[in-house]
Image: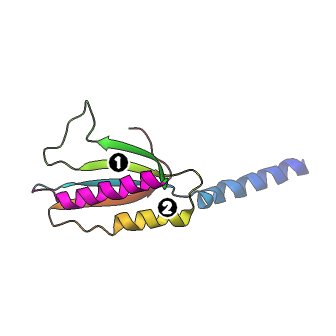
Amino acid sequence: MLKFTCFMIVGAVLSITAPTFAESRAVNISIGSIGGSLDNAALRTVRQIIGFGVGTGTVDKFIVYSPRNGFPIPIEGGLSACAEAGFGISNTRFNAFIQELRSINPKPGTFYNVELTASCKQK
């Protein structure tokens, strides 16, 4: 009985603290127009940063959610995607990639979001 009680206590403690050990090893990226013209320079910069991240191994998984074949394409353009940290990449290196994405300031009329997530998921 004592072993069972200890097992239950340890299990409860681990279930409470498990979310604190989870790391954000991916980032959702979305850029698009809010009705006017899209800031194409900002979109190109986002694509270049992501491309460099893939090329250097900082990003191991890259999923484009929109535009996508067989789905409606926004008239204004834009991008909705997810980039996940490469295998064996340090948090410092991936965080530098995220900071580079966050340094982009598109012109008014263009929305831009960079949100941390645990991993990229197929939609």
Identified at 62% across, 59% down, the residue is: 21
Identified at 90% across, 47% down, the residue is: 1
Residue 78 is left or right of residue 10, and the answer is left
Label 1 Cα crowd, 10 Å radius (few <14 / some 14-19 / many 20+): some
Residue 82 image position (x, y, % from top left): 39, 49
Query: At numbered mark 1, what does the secondary structure look like: helix, strand or loop?
Result: strand
Give 100 or 26, whichever is nearer the viewer. 100
Q: Is residue 122 visible?
A: yes
Circle 2: residue type:
Phe
Give 22 or 59, whichever is nearer the viewer. 59
Figure check: 119 above or below 96: above
Q: Which mark is residue 94?
A: 2
Comes first in the chain, label 2 or label 1? 1
Query: At numbered mark 2, what does the secondary structure look like: helix, strand or loop?
Result: helix
- Which residues lie in the magenta part? 36-56
Q: Which mark is residue 81?
A: 1
